[in-house]
Image (spheres, rainbow, N blue to C red):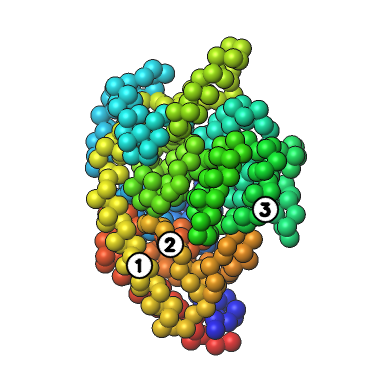
Amino acid sequence: MIEPSAISALRTRESARFVANNPKSKSVFENSSGWFQKVPFHWMLDWPSPFPIVAASAEGAHLTSIDGQQFDDFCLGDTASMFGHSPPALSAALAQQAGQGLSYMLPTVKGAELSSMLAEMFGLPHWQVTTTASEANRAVIRWCRGLTGRQKILIFNGCYHGAVDDVFVDLRDGVAINRPSLIGQVQDLLPTTVALEFNDLDALESALRNGEIACVLAEPVMTNIGMVRDAPGYLETLRRLCSDTGTLLVFDETHTISSGYGGHSNSHGPMPDIMVIGKSIGGGVPCAVYGFTAQVSARMEALNKSRPSGHSGIGTTLSANALAITAMHAMLGQVITRPAYDHMLAMADRLVSGLRQLIDIRGLPWHVSHVGARVEFVCASEPPLNGSEARAAMDHELETAIHLYLTNRGILLAPFHNMMLLSPVTRPEQVDRLLHALDSCVGELLEIKA
């Protein structure tokens, strides 16, 4: 049993070590007074270290700090660089495009080719490009309401679909509330957003059978509150209920593209009516896409013809800019390949096997969750079935202590929970270093006495 006093002692020691090892990062942070909270964006403060590492460069599955430290990167930009930092094909394509213009507000030959590449990889015939997955999800919600004439959407407790107002409803003790952490929220979301627990079939059927839901917006595997896997048959029943009730099924595969080639939908099923993909599809260049069936496309076209001319509330000037198109064209054409997934999945299997062996040998009440190239160890004995259980399973103090320990030994995990990504360029020795460092951390925690 790991004692709270051991966690506190290790955290104090490792914080001091981090400060001593990163003087240049500390200086840059302290002198960045022009930025609000000293960082360009607030989530850079979510790392468990006393201040953020300042990155100098990254290549493949390695990152180098300005203090000269080398890191095995299992965060990979929280999925944005899941296929490796700066793949050569992407770097070359971006360099060439930089000399040819970055944003035209006009289509390109690569754009025409990209639409077919998306259709081939993800199995949906029609696509649109946005700048972020947040923007894609906002557009999709608007389309679904327009196509169905229904106002309500359905999401799952603990979800995250980007900076989209409509999805910020939580369940606390079974009661729906507007997420209290939102800044400047003025609209009550409860009349138009239904929040349910993932894997609750009875609640799902009850909510959909009344015919008021425009769309279900979901990850096929929840990833933003830790990992919550779908119960056997749950997604297939979700698909059937949506079809039966005229509800559009939207899968946000921004993270679950890690499940396999073509995303979770193509690797495991079922297929949605609309699919959203962001982050990694451009290799870290800001872009996202949403694809949809031929039936949805025909309904969208009819809706467009029926409305007055003018702003639709969908799209921005930088959507589908030439740089983003070029990035996705290079990624889909040369980087996001079936052999790339074969390597990623093999590395994930190596990591999962090692983690389970570590947990068993150390006698820890933990478990491992994984799907495809996304792996997590959870400091609780049973896999959660929904967002409430996943939230309750989190041990913030223990997790942050472990993260800081690993960081000081050249290993980066995602800062939000114990998520690790395996890339096409992650090497077996990197996985082994992670396992060795985690085992050393656990061993020290178990040995520290109150």
How far is mark 2 from mark 3, CA to CA?
26 Å
Q: Check disc 2 and report the residue beneath it.
A: 370
Q: Using the rendered view, name the quadrant where residue 311 is placed.
A: top right
Q: Secondary structure at mark 2?
A: strand
Percent position (x, y) of residue 147?
A: 59, 27
Q: Nearer the viewer, residue 441 or 9?
A: 441
> Label 2 crowding class (10 Å Cα cut-off): few <14, some 14-19, many 20+?
many
For the residue marked with disc 2, what is the amino acid?
His
Q: Is residue 112 above or below residue 169?
A: above
Q: Check disc 1 and report the residue beneath it.
A: 351
Q: Which mark is residue 203?
A: 3
Percent position (x, y) of residue 112?
A: 32, 24
Could you tell whether 197 is left or right of 268 in the image? right
Q: Residue at x 35, y 73 (%)?
A: 354
Q: Residue at x 52, y 78 (%)?
A: 365
Percent position (x, y) of residue 85?
A: 32, 48
For the residue marked with disc 1, what is the amino acid?
Leu
How far is mark 1 from mark 3, CA to CA?
36 Å
Q: Secondary structure at mark 3?
A: helix
Given contact means CB atoms under 8 Å apart, are the residues at marks 1 and 2 in contact? yes
Q: Residue at x 62, y 46 (%)?
A: 155
Q: Is residue 123 above or below residue 263?
A: above
